[in-house]
Amino acid sequence: MQRYEQAVEFLYGLQTFGMKLGLDKTRRLAELAGNPERELRFIHVAGTNGKGSTCAMLESMYRNAGLRVGLYTSPHLVRFGERIQVNRNPISDADIVRLIDEAKGWLKDFSGKDHPTFFETVTVIALRYFAEQRCDLVIWETGMGGRLDATNIITPLASVITNVQFDHQQYLGETISKIAFEKAGIIKPGVPVITAATAEALRVIQDVAAALHARLSIVTREADIEPLPGKHQRMNAAVALETVRILSETLSAAPLASVSWPGRLQRIGKFILDGAHNLPGIETLDRELTGRPAIIFGVLSDKDWPAMLRIMAKRASRLLFVPVKSKRALPPEELLTVASGTVCESLADALEKTKGDAQVLITGSLFLVGEAMELIGVAPAPSRDERVLNER
């Protein structure tokens, strides 16, 4: 356990190198690792919302067809190992320790401003692990954007763009067109593209696909699959099914009805956990809710939190504001400038205050949902808070 804690501490130290969009360091790091990406086949998934759910659906269909499937996603909710899975089994603590020891050797070739970031390093560790595990296919989720995201050093079998909405504007651009251009950066020459994007974003994707002679398939109707929770999940399912069709695979859609992706409209007793952390996500969540639950809300300061909160205030029977365990957290007292509510010292305090409520929604941040999973006993807590590794 001590070696694992030391490995996590090393990963935490990589965060001092910040977040730098670009592919040069990741390519160089992958070369030092033996270019494991050349041994693998990928489906690359980008988009503002629904990436993780779409990845989980693709993984489920291919795994149930008998393939050995790698799954790379971010962020994690509780433990770092959630990011790197094979057949839905997270990478072991022992393998994390071993691969980080290997990565330390690769990183000696870098110094100063050229040092790889946390995400760049973890991306190459994931590639190395999937190659070692002899995965038949890897479902490969972008971290942010696409064009300059570390995951974009691969050439996939198909490129998937779930949708394009406003989020991370400080990195991706202030308009839908600019954001769409960044996400369309995962499109490769001659590689098919599948998207449920619409309007302005779709036009950008169409232009990029045409320039690269990449066949474009546009998904406009959600899949008729029950009991997937929410219309948006049925649209994600439609994107996953179209991807499979484009790749000329004959796979059963049956696994989609029971696919699991924690923290997204997840119901546990009286609790609903939803990691909606941007305005489009909150709007989608509101459309799928029924009734007027007590809402525990915490949010990061770099989100459009006033608009998010106004929507939740109309839905809530009452609001409880909590701090999020992140350096980017918005102080819960500031939420009172937009809506009336009870400021709580912690999520644990808010859970205590809602013991008598029939239905409780916890939302606003994936950091918050991960903490909730620990506190209500859905996921065992690690020895130290590993959500800090999600910080940019």
Image (cartoon, rainbow, N blue to C red):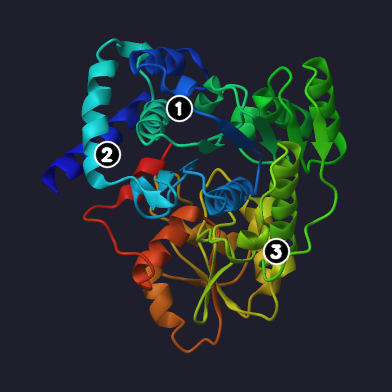
What is the quadrant of residue 192 in the picture?
top right
Residue 163 seen by the camera = no
Q: Residues within 10 Å of mark 3 (few under 14, many from 20)?
A: some
Query: In the picture, which quadrant includes the C terminus?
Result: top left
Q: Nearer the viewer, residue 309 or 288?
A: 288
What is the quadrant of residue 210 in the picture?
top right
Q: Give the amino acid at mark 1.
A: Met
> Dots 3 and 1: beta carbons under 8 Å?
no
Q: Residues within 10 Å of mark 1 (few under 14, many from 20)?
A: some
Q: Which mark is residue 263?
A: none
Find the distance from the CA under tag 1 to the CA under tag 2: 22 Å
Instruction: From the viewer's perspective, tell me whether residue 171 is left or right of residue 9.
Output: right
The secondary element bearing badge 3 is classed as helix
Question: Where is mark 2, residue-wise?
Answer: 96
Q: Along the polypeptide, which appears first: circle 3 or circle 2? A: 2
Residue 167 seen by the camera = yes
| Front disc: 1 or 2 | 2
Q: Residue at x 42, y 26 (%)?
A: 120
Q: Position of residue 386 (x, y in %)?
A: 31, 49
Q: Give the amino acid at mark 3.
A: Ile
Question: Where is mark 1, residue-wise?
Answer: 19
Find the distance from the CA under tag 3 to the CA under tag 1: 31 Å
Q: Give the amino acid at mark 2.
A: Ile
Q: Residue at x 37, y 36 (%)?
A: 133
| Front disc: 3 or 1 | 1
Question: Where is mark 3, residue-wise?
Answer: 311
- Up the image or down, 319 lies above or below 327; here it is below
For the image, the number of numbered tags is 3
